[in-house]
Each structure stands twice: as C-alpha cells, then as structure tokens.
Amino acid sequence: MQEGITALHAAAEKGHQRTVALLLENGAEVDRKTAEGRAALYIAAKRGHVEVVKSLLEHGGDIETNRKNGRTAIVIASKKGNVEVVKYLAGRGANLEACRNDRCTPLYYAAKKGHVEVAQFLIDSTAALEASSIDGTTPLMIAAQKGRPVMVEVLIDRGANVEACRKDGCTALYLAAKMGQLRIVKLLLEHGANADARDTILGITPLAVAAIEGHLEVVKHLLANAHASFTSTNQVR
C-alpha cells in the first residue's frame, strides 16, 4: 500500500460510495492527501467513480484540490476519458482551464488520448480551443501528433486553428507528417493547412521532415496534392 493511504482513499479508489459516505460522516478528512499528493476526490475521478465524486463534494471536498504537479480532478478525469465525472465536475463549477505545471488543460489531455466525447463536452462548455502547453502545443497539434484523426476532425470542425504553431514553429501538419500520420495529413490539407510552413530550428517543411523520417506515403501525398517544397532554410545535419 502506498504511503499515506487512508481508509477513505482506499474506499474511493474501489468505488465504494456507501463506505465513503460512512467514513466522511464519522470524521474522515475529506481533503487529506497521500504522500504523492492525491486526495480521495482525485483518486475517484481518475477511476471514474462518479457517485464517490458526488459524495466527496457533498461533504465539502475541494473541487480544485490538486497533486504536486498541479493536476486537478477534472484534468485526470479528462485524461482517462471518464466523461460522466467530467460532466459532473464541470456542473459543480470545476475550472475547465485547470492545468498541470506544464499548462496542459483538460481539453489538451482529452485530445491527446482521443477521448472524443469528453473533448466535445469541454468545447461545448466553452473550454479554450487554443489553450496550449508550456511549449505551445495546442489540442489540435497533440491530436495530430498522436494519430487521433476523429479528434482532429472534431477540433477543426469546432474552429481550431490549423495554422497555429508551437514555440519551435511546428504546426499540426508538420507534427502529423513527422509521425507518418497520413490520414491526418490529408485532413489538415483539406482544411487549408500550409504545406510549406517551416519549423524555426532547422527551417524544414512537413515534406522534408516526412522524408527524413522515411514516411513514404506522406511524402507521396504532399508531393501530389500540396505542391510541397523540398527545401529547408538550414542544412539538415
């Protein structure tokens, strides 16, 4: 058992709502954290136990309690795809822009993991489409990089900027090309992504990075459909 785990933490993790309620009624500390900084609310949200989440909040749990890295209950629920927990937490006023120390929001994690229903709910609840991580990666970029075509389509349909770029100049198209995500490359081009956008490190294009990584089908598609540039502004070493 992990250090600092109480009966409340254990019951919350297993989803035993009645036990959780009984413990709270008998003086259990609702916001007490384990040695790793996990409160019972965080644990229940991670596991998708919405009834336990309800009990904890009804007994005064802090909806914004977070781990040492800054991750709150709605962030972890979004990452795990626990849509009912996300909906309940949002309904209780959880911060939709809550983020870890690396500035990754609930929508960022939903996009990264491909949890479409969670992402759609967050967007409908006015979560920021362009909220970016510490290096400037947006939900669209991470979805493109991780190979989540349905998520990419949803984000674009909801208005995500296909030309947004990270601090190093990489766009969603660049990241998809680098990872060999042909279906996503096609989607982004269909929605007007610039095939000649270059990173700011080597000055290379999506075509060049796809060639460097050996993604033949991506190279073929960029050549045939985007009149993409071969050239870089710097010598690739």
Image: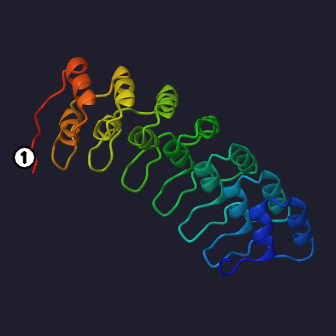
Residue at 76% x, 54% y is 49
Q: Which residue is mark 1?
A: 235
Q: Position of residue 160 (x, y in %)?
A: 45, 33
Three-letter amino acid code at the position of disc 1: Gln
Q: Position of residue 146 (x, y in %)?
A: 42, 42
Residue at 39% x, 25% y is 187
Residue at 73% x, 60% y is 44
Answer yes or no: is residue 195 visible: no
Depth check, front residue: 155 or 48:
48
Tell me if residue 209 comes above or below residue 39 in the rendering.
Answer: above
Residue at 68% x, 53% y is 94
Depth check, front residue: 36 or 32:
36
Left or right of 235? Residue 26 is right
Q: Position of residue 97 (x, y in %)?
A: 57, 51
Q: Secondary structure at mark 1?
A: loop
Q: How many marks?
A: 1
